Each structure stands twice: as C-alpha cells, then as structure tokens.
Image (tube, grey):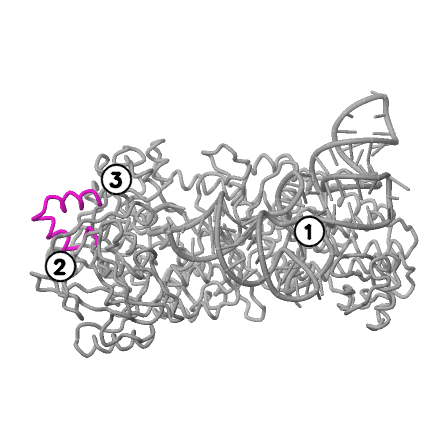
Amino acid sequence: MSIPYKPDVVEAEAQQYWRDARCFEVDEDPSKDKFYCLTMFPYPSGKLHMGHVRVLTISDVIARYQRMQGKHVLQPMGWDAFGMPAENAAIKNRVPPAEWTYRNIDEMRTQMDRLGYAYDWSREIATCRPEYYRWEQWLFTKMFDKGLVYRKNSVVNWDPVDQTVLANEQVIDGRGWRSDALVERREIPQWFMKITAYADELLEELDRMPGWPESVKTMQRNWIGRSEGVELSFDVQGEEEPLTVYTTRPDTLFGVTYMAVAAEHPLAKKAAAGNREVAAFIEECVKTDASEATLETMEKKGMPLGISAIHPLTGDEVPLWVANFVLMSYGTGAVMAVPGHDERDWEFAKKHGIEIRQVIKPADGTRIDIQAEVYVDKGVLVNSGEWDGLDFEAAFNAIADHFEKTGRGRRAVNYRLRDWGVSRQRYWGAPIPIIYCDDCGAVPVPEEHLPVVLPEDVQVTGAGSPLKDMPEFVDVACPKCGKDARRETDTFDTFVESSWYFARYACPDADTAMLDERAAYWTPVDQYTGGIEHAILHLLYSRFFQRVMRDEGLTDVSEPFTNLLTQGMVLKDGAKMSKNKGNVVDPQELIAKYGADTVRLFMMFAAPPEQSLEWSDEGVQGSYRFLKRFWHAVLDHTVAGPVAALDASALDDDQKALRHKTHQTIRKINDDIGRRSSFNTAIAASMELLNAVNRFEDDSEQGRAVVHEALEAVVLMLSPMTPHICHALWKALGHDTAVIDQRWPAVDESALELATIELVVQVNGKLRGRVVVPADAGKDAIEQFAIADDNVQRFVGGKDIRKVIVVPGRLVNIVV
RNA sequence: GCCGGGAUGGCGGAACUGGUAGACGCGCCGGAUUCAAAAUCCGGUUCUGGAGACAGAGUGGGGGUUCGAUUCCCCCUCCCGGCACCA
C-alpha cells in the first residue's frame, strides 16, 4: 500500500518550491512570446468568497496552461481598493477606511497564496495608494486641457433626512437605507468624461473583436445605441426659443398629437411657476429615485402644461405635457409623441384621451384599426399631405431634406450612450484634482502638485464627506492667480481606477509616467476573465480609457482585452451566495479539510465557466475522492520499480487500446482547454483515462510502459487545475524537473489509427442497431453491413428502402 | 419596461458544425472487505412495460423545417445578469 495523500503537506511543499524558485516573477523578454493573463481585480471586502475562488482559479488554469504551451506568462494581482463598503465599515466599527482596507488586503493575499495561484506579486497594485491614483489625476488634468472633461448639473438621489447623496444601491423601495426617508431626485454640479466622443470608435471596433463573446458585444452595441434620425424644432407659444426634439421616425411626423418634456425641463419649471397643479405634479415626479429601471417600470403619468407647440408642417397646435417617463439626461429632455405608431405614446394617449392619428399603413395593404391597436412597423405614409404614399426611407429623406432646407432641423446621429459622470460625494476615493477660484473658475491641479493625497486618518460619520470639514485639505491657493481658493472635495467613481489598472501592472513602479515602455511589451491583455455583470460598464469604460491613454501618446494599443471570458456566479440552493441569505460557504474551511487542489478541482469540474455553478458539498467530496484515487494510481504504479521504454510496435491489442485512449484524451483536452475553455469536460476526460488505467491489469514490461505514458499525460494535463498534487506526482514518476516547467504532452497520431469502427444504424431516424465495420469500408459495404443486422431486419424486412444516408464515421440511416 | 443569457435523469452537468440524448461526477440501490463503522473496491441506476431480448415515451410549454432537432425557425412561461452612484 502506497503512502496516503496528505494535501496540506503536498501543497505546502509545492508552494515553497514556487516561492523559492520565484517561478511566477517575469521580466520583459522580447525574444519570448508573451501571454498576459488577467482576472478582474477584487474589491478587498474582507475574506475571499467562492465567487473569487472561481474566477481566480479559471484564470490561473489558463495562465498555467499557456505556460506549458511555451508562453512567457504574466499573471498579476491587485486590489480595487476604493469603495463604499470601507466607509460603511468605518461608520459601523469606527475604523478609518484605509486601515480596514489594508487589513483586508493582507488577509485576502494570504488566502490567495494558500490556493496556489501563480501570481507575480512583485507587481501588486492597490488603487488607494497615491503612487497609483496620482496618474489618473494626471490623466484627468490632461483630459481637462483637451476638453474631454466638463462640469454640468445632473441628478442624484438625495436623502432629505441624512442630508446626503445616496447610491442607487442605498435606495430601497424609494427610501434611504439608513433614514427610511423618501428619496428625492436633486440636481448638483458634477464632472463628466466625454465617452460619447469615442462612441463611434467604441461601436465599430466591436466588429473586429473575435475574442469577445457575442453576447457581450451585443450588449455593448445596444448600450451605445447609435441611431440615425432627425433633429427638428417646434415653436412654442409665448416662447422665444423653439423646442428641439430628436426622432428616428420623421415619417410619422404628421401623427404628432402631443409633446412631452421631463420634469426637470425648463418649460416644465416655468409652467409650474404659474400653475399649482403642475408644480405639485413635478414635486411628485421628483420623489423617486434616479435609476432608469425605476423610471421605466413605474406607472406612466403626465400633466398638460397648458401651453402648445406649433406643428412645423401643419401649423396645428400640439399640446405640451410634462411626463414622468421622459428622461432629462437622454437627448433634449423632450419628445414628440406619435400615439398611432409608438406603443408608449399610444397607451398614454388612450389614458388621457389624446387624439390618435394614423399616418402609416402596412405596405401589404392589411387593414388596421389604429384606435384598437398601435401599429409600430414601418410602412407607407397616409394622411401626410404631399408625402402620402412614400415608404419609410423615401419619407425619411424627403422630410429631412425639407427641414434642412428650411433651417428648422437636420439629420442627426444620436447615441443612447451618455457621458460618464465621475463625481462622487464620498470620502474613500481618489480626489478629483480641481481647485475652484472665484476669479479663475475651475482650475486643474498642476502636474508638480500631484498627487492630491487623500488624508487617511479620518472619522467617517455617514453625514457627508469628512473632507469638507478639513480646512487643511480644502483651503488652497489658486494655482493660476494665487488667491485663496477651495479644493474640490468630490472623489472619483471607483470605475476610474479599474479602467486602466491592467496597463499599470506592466510598470507598477513607474514614477515619472503613467505608463512606460514595459507596457508596450505586455499590453494588451491576452486573456481577461471576470463576471458577466461587468459586461457593460467596466468593460466599456476600460475600452474608453485605453483610447484616451492612446491619444495621450502613452500606448499604441486601442483595445485593452483581446480575449474575454465571462464567468457565471456561484450559487447555493439556487441563489447567489450572500451573507443576507445565509448560504455562504467559506473557502477557508474547505481548504483546511480537503486542500486547495480539491477546491480548485471542484470549481472547474462542477460547471462550464460561463454558467452559474451550483455549490454541492457532496460534489467537493467527489473531487477529493478522485484526487485520492489519482494519487494511489500513480504511487502504486511507481512502487513496482522502474519502467522500460515504450515500444509502440510491440504492443498487444489491449495495450494498443489504452494507448489509443491516452492520445485521444490528449487531443480532446487540448481542444477543451485551448480552444473552448471547457475545463469541466477536460477534467471528465482525465477521469475517464484514469478509470481506464485502473481497469487495465497488465504487469508486463510493455503493459507498464503504456500505463506510465498514460499517467504522465494525466499528471501534465491536470497540473493547471490541481498544480500541487501534480507537482508531487511528477516527481514520483521519476523526474527531477518540476512539472510547472514541462511542456504540454504531444499527440502521437499513429496511436489514434483504428482497424475497425462502430457505426450506429437507424431506421427512419430511430436507433435500431450497431455494426462494426472496417475503418476503410465504402458506402456500399457499410449499407450491406447495416441491413444485415438482425434488429435492423425486423424494421426493414419486406419494406421498400427509399433512401440510405451514410454519415462517415458516425451512422447509417435507412428510410423505408 | 428595455438589453443580454439560461431551462436536459433524484442532483451538477455531457452531447462542440443538424447525426447514438444522459459522458464524467454526486446521490441512491445491491454486493465485497470489516467485530463494527468510516474509508476503499466491484456491479446497477432517465421513465414506463418486460425475466430478458427489446419496445414505447423523453431535453421548460406549444407549433414548424428535416431522412434525422437538446441543436435551426416562430410563439409562450419561468429563472438569472445589466440598466449608468454596488463592485
């Protein structure tokens, strides 16, 4: 009996070896083929949870696999260290956010090491360090100079009791999470980055990104939401300024029977001044949170403003409404409404008794009743004066031309994408490097004064940012004129830090520039892995920032991530693991009980990476059992002494069959890991091969040689998933090199050749039998074999054969 | 509400390009080993009928295309992710 499998001993030994040999620290070597493998860096929330373990393991498997393919692999790790949870913990425990954060980082780093991840720790980043955030402050000032940032009013959630701005997450059923007060929308001045300036490039490049999942690219396309339409203006009674609206359906213009503006729109505010009902309605509208999901799902309400616009073609008066579903932040904050040909407008018109006018009819002549059902498809114009009979495209062009000629409108491309608001009224973030001067206005902090360091020794109370009460932070001299001025106390959205960290890993210690020449070697990231919840915001902001850095001359790279893998969540009892639900499984306990390899193996085996993973304690035990079987299979084999060289020409049929299985498995796992990131099936294939080895009882010289080859293959191919046990078993198989430095096993094509193959025989598409035929049998011969089968005869006998379909290597289908 | 995804045995999943539905693992049942238990090993395990050979049904629901559909098309239900201040 061989020695027992002791994961704690095996794992400590392997980790010691990697540490001593500095296996994962890499330099920039132009002679080598680089592979940059990256995980979305974690927020240091306290301890690792299973979601972390999953994504980190997926990435580690890819990194180790690529290394065995001969790549020069960089896999760094760091911390997305700014964020709200640190402030919440600070309020609760009276610990400064910085202290809490650094403590969590230390704990999580220790846990990661215990899981055996192949990180180059010499490149570790924490975004809350001034050495890091000074460079995003610097880039912000460069963007300021280029006009890529600007300040404007925008809506936030305001808690009227706590007198503070709330994140959407802190609004629960329209109320503040701490005060329980009804949340209000309030406008405050905030800084914006002009991501819309890159909208077209961000959209178009998606077509040239084969390494990203289609679903993510589709979501980004829809999010950017490019549309072609017409911007046109309606005169408003008693107003100097016309009301401008954007529409993608100028062909429906004759069907406009009302217009609607947002509650924050100047026309609505003006009307409210003279109309108590309107004022009350607007006040009502403001008492909701600012999220789009809320606005889109709540009951559609509106109120006539008592003023009218003039239809630019017919001269008709069109009543003006204020409506809760019109967004001030999208387009011009006003819409023209065509109830006959827009679903929402139709419902609103029905509810408020507004006229519904048909101006489009189906091109195929189908009759419709516009009063009974809305018609939103494109068709042919009716009731539209001189444009009657035109189709969508002709009408679009004719009407657009008309407006351009009269100077009352123009063709316009519109984006759903809005500029990125980066101001946060919070303490634990990177200070926005701006100084306000009464004379000079908003002045960016000069480069020689950067970084603007966030004071770390503070008391956080939850009632506004503590920075506001720190004169030593706020009171400064204007960098332009020297007069007394005030420093901006808002901090950056934490997405700013995560929009460029991937490039900084290449040169984390560069102290004279944001990026240096080392970034040119490592970027772009070859493989990026993270949660699907980041499909839009983080990934789009990163693509934007990469381009800003490019245009600043810091890099030639436009797309930060060549290949993207989005992993699913870890569930228990069908729900996401969370403290609230009380269904959290602590990785630490499992590692203590079974070892890191078992946890890693289960994570990779239980589900394909993109899908959600259902946690199972029994499943973990199964993985542990497999590793024990694996351990003993190798040690029982080696304990019998040295193995002779394999002679492929001297094998009997059973030995050939095992060899066939070995090389077939290598080919399959190559494809599973290398091409389709299908780690679960790769592990299943390894298990099958090991099962075949365990069933194979042959102590002859060549029998043991064939087993040795199979076991070496399994050790090599499982080593990305379970690196520690494979480190030990590789030595046990008689090697004095480390498995981490081995090359991936090669397929011996000659071992895959077969004399006969089994085919499935169907009759009318139903399985009726199996036949074994020579591998080189022709179609006619295969038909003969198939029809001769006894069971097939029962279904074919005496009937006319209409057709026989032979799928080479797979099946025969006889149609009778 | 809008955008993206998902649904396959008792459970997690496999079937990759329209070609054997259920690989692999868990659980369960039976057996071996043991004083006993744990651990381990061997066999069985989609459902229904049948001693069996085998037959019928079967991939969320309804329709369609095809010699053949988990896979393609249309409609529907439920679940998950995102919706711009959670990260």
Please give the label number shown on residue A183.
3
**To which residue does mark 1 refer?**
A683
Q: Position of residue A348 (x, y in %)?
A: 27, 52
Please tell me if label 1 and label 3 are on a single chain.
yes
Q: Quadrant of residue A744?
A: bottom right
Within-10-Å neighbours for mark 1: few <14, some 14–19, many 20+ = many
Chain letter for mark 2: A
Q: Quadrant of the N terminus of chain A?
A: top right
* Disc 3 chain ID: A
Asked if both marks, 2 and 1, belong to the same chain, the answer given is yes
Give the mark nearest the N terminus, 2 or 3. Answer: 3
Question: Which one is in front in this view, the residue at disc 2 or the one at disc 1?
Answer: 2
Magenta segment: A262-285
Q: Are marks 2 and 3 in contact (CB under 8 Å)?
A: no
Residue sitting at x 35%, y 34%: A95
Residue extending furthest front?
A367
Q: Earlier in the sequence, mark 1 or mark 3?
A: 3
> x, y percentage for residue A785?
87, 65
Mark 1 element type: helix
Does the segment drawn in magenta span residue A557? no
Residue of label 2? A308
Residue type highlighted by circle 1: Ile
Estimate the spatial distance between the alpha carbons at disc 2 and disc 3, rounded to whole Å: 32 Å
Q: Secondary structure at mark 2?
A: strand
Of A176 and A319, the residue lying toward us: A319
Element under disc 3: loop
Residue A35 falls in which quadrant of the image?
bottom right
